Image (tube, rainbow, N blue to C red):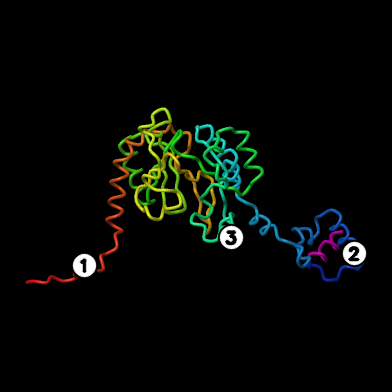
């Protein structure tokens, strides 16, 4: 037996007999301890996959745990509804276009799918779950001006204002980043249908389809809406929470001064030079 083992390892002087080699090959195949069973056999060439390759393909335990800890879409939408923010289905990206298939859609993947979105909006979890399961790619909007408003500012200005507000211990509610260029501050609404004098329409500021004309602060109130996370936009952009909907809605006036100041600084730093401005003095 010792001589056989020596020959198999290449340390003996003679060659192993064909019978012994065949026996060892069969044993290796049956027990999984032969050379070919050291790793999984790849589908491409029939060669074994090394244990190192198998280990490298495994996701780290921390990554698997992080993935498990990420709330799913329905849970995130349920949390928004539980906070009292009414939801309705919205369009979603279809390639680089909008799922509505409207040629030249001004707000691709950012608008409701129904013209009755204001009356359709609801906080009923069962209805939201039905929508989410029936339309697995759909984004969702929340109608503003009934329970909450949204102060919508350029992303850079919003980040600056958020930092200052938190440093001053100001109560800041839910905050989301939208599309890589805007930040949304969710607040309580300034008015209700019972207080019509305060419940002004959003058209006094801007309409959702004319947002590009209002690069500074946008106040979404009655008659407007915004996307809620999680939402997907064309080009791989997203709408994500910075501060979740579990935070209470603050009075918008507690945030307004900081946001307007940040927007003014942002506008000054990013203003385009006047092409008609004289580049040199006319007099000495």
Q: Nearer the viewer, residue 13 or 160?
A: 160
- Determine contact: label 1, label 3, CB under 8 Å: no
- Say which residue appears at 41% left-offset and 52% top-offset: 211
The residues tagged by marks 3 and 2 sit, at their Cα atoms, a distance apart of 57 Å
Q: Local crowd at mark 1 within 10 Å, few (<14), some, or many (≥20)?
A: few
Q: Which residue is mark 1?
A: 277
In three-dimensional space, the C-alpha distance between marks 1 and 2, rounded to whole angstroms, equals: 92 Å
Q: Label 2: how many residues lie within 10 Å, few (<14), some (14-19) or many (20+)?
A: few
**Cβ–Cβ under 8 Å for marks 3 and 2:** no
Question: Measuring 57% from the left and 40% from the top, which residue is drawn there?
Answer: 71
Q: Earlier in the sequence, mark 1 or mark 3?
A: 3
Task: Pick whichever, 18 or 78, lies toward us.
Answer: 78
Closer to us: mark 3 or mark 2? 3
Query: Split into 4 quadrants, where in the image is the N terminus?
Result: bottom right
Question: What kind of element bears circle 1?
Answer: loop
Q: What x and y, as percent, mark residue 169?
A: 33, 34
In this picture, residue 144 sits left or right of residue 253: right
> Which residue in the structure is indicated by mark 2?
22
Q: Earlier in the sequence, mark 3 or mark 2?
A: 2
**Magenta-highlighted residues:** 1-9
Q: Which mark is residue 107?
A: none
Q: Which residue is mark 3?
A: 95
Q: Residue at 45% x, 44% y: name it.
A: 176
């Amino acid at each position: 037996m010792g001589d056989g083992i020596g020959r198999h390892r290449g340390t003996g002087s003679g060659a192993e007999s064909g019978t012994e080699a065949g026996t060892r090959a069969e044993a290796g195949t049956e027990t999984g301890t032969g050379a070919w069973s050291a790793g999984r056999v790849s589908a491409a060439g029939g060669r074994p996959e090394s244990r190192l390759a198998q280990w490298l393909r495994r996701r780290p335990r921390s990554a698997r745990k992080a993935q498990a800890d990420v709330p799913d879409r329905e849970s995130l939408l349920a949390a928004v509804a539980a906070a009292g923010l009414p939801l309705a289905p919205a369009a979603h990206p279809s390639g680089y276009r909008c799922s509505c298939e409207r040629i030249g859609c001004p707000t691709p993947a950012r608008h409701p799918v129904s013209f009755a979105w204001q009356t359709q909006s609801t906080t009923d979890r069962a209805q939201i779950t039905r929508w989410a399961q029936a339309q697995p790619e759909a984004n969702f909007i929340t109608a503003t001006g009934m329970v909450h408003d949204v102060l919508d500012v350029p992303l850079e200005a919003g980040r600056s204002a958020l930092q200052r507000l938190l440093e001053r211990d100001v109560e800041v509610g839910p905050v989301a980043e939208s599309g890589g260029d805007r930040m949304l501050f969710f607040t309580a609404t300034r008015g209700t249908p019972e207080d019509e004098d305060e419940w002004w329409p959003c058209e006094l500021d801007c309409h959702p389809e004319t947002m590009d004309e209002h690069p500074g602060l946008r106040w979404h109130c009655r008659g407007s809406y915004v996307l809620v996370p999680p939402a997907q936009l064309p080009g791989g952009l997203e709408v994500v929470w910075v501060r979740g909907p579990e935070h209470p809605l603050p009075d918008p006036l507690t945030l307004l001064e900081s946001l307007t100041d940040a927007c003014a600084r942002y506008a000054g730093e990013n203003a385009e030079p006047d092409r008609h401005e004289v580049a040199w003095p006319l007099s000495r």
